[in-house]
Amino acid sequence: MDFSATMQPQFENENFDANLALVEVVRAAAKRAATPSQVALAWVLEQGEHIVTIPGTTKIRNLTDNLGALHVQLSDEDRTRLSDLFAHVKGTRYNEQGMAAIDR
């Protein structure tokens, strides 16, 4: 069984479909020749010095794509729309056991 299906309720059945629809907002923000991953990373990088993103990659082409986020300029509208996505995410990040382990 897939880890994401058993450990992360956001990826379960109807939650997955609802959350996948949110990706369209990221794709819309990527209309300026940026990839959705670059848009997501650019948004995280703008959240302040106290927030750090650690994108994992096993391929040079993905590393190159990730580094492209440093050149993405998000509009105020993009920032607002991307920030508003969190209120619409369905399912918790981890299953009940995983959530109980947070901040222990």
Image (spheres, helix red, strand yellow):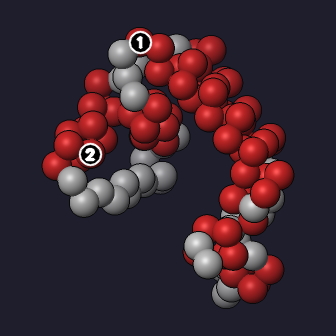
Q: Which residue is at 69% across, 59% downward? A: 11
Q: Looking at numbered disc 1 in the image, what kind of residue is underneath it?
A: Arg
**x, y (%) of residue 73?**
40, 19
Left or right position of 3 against 92: left
The residue where tag 2 is placed is 62
Left or right position of 34 against 51: left
The residue where tag 1 is placed is 32
Left or right position of 72 against 67: right
Seen from the viewer's position, the closer of residues 15 and 94 is 15
What is the spatial separation of the Cα atoms under label 2 and label 1, in whole angstroms?
19 Å
**x, y (%) of residue 38?**
39, 33
**x, y (%) of residue 24?**
63, 27
Q: Which residue is at 26% across, 45% downward? A: 62
Q: Looking at numbered disc 2 in the image, what kind of residue is underneath it?
A: Asn
Q: Which mark is residue 85?
A: none
Query: Residue 80, located in which quarter of the rendered image?
Result: top right
> Which of the two discs, 2 and 1, labels the residue nearer the N terminus?
1
- Quadrant of the image containing the C terminus: bottom right
**x, y (%) of residue 5?**
67, 69
Q: Label 1: state its secondary structure.
A: helix
Q: Label 2: state its secondary structure.
A: helix
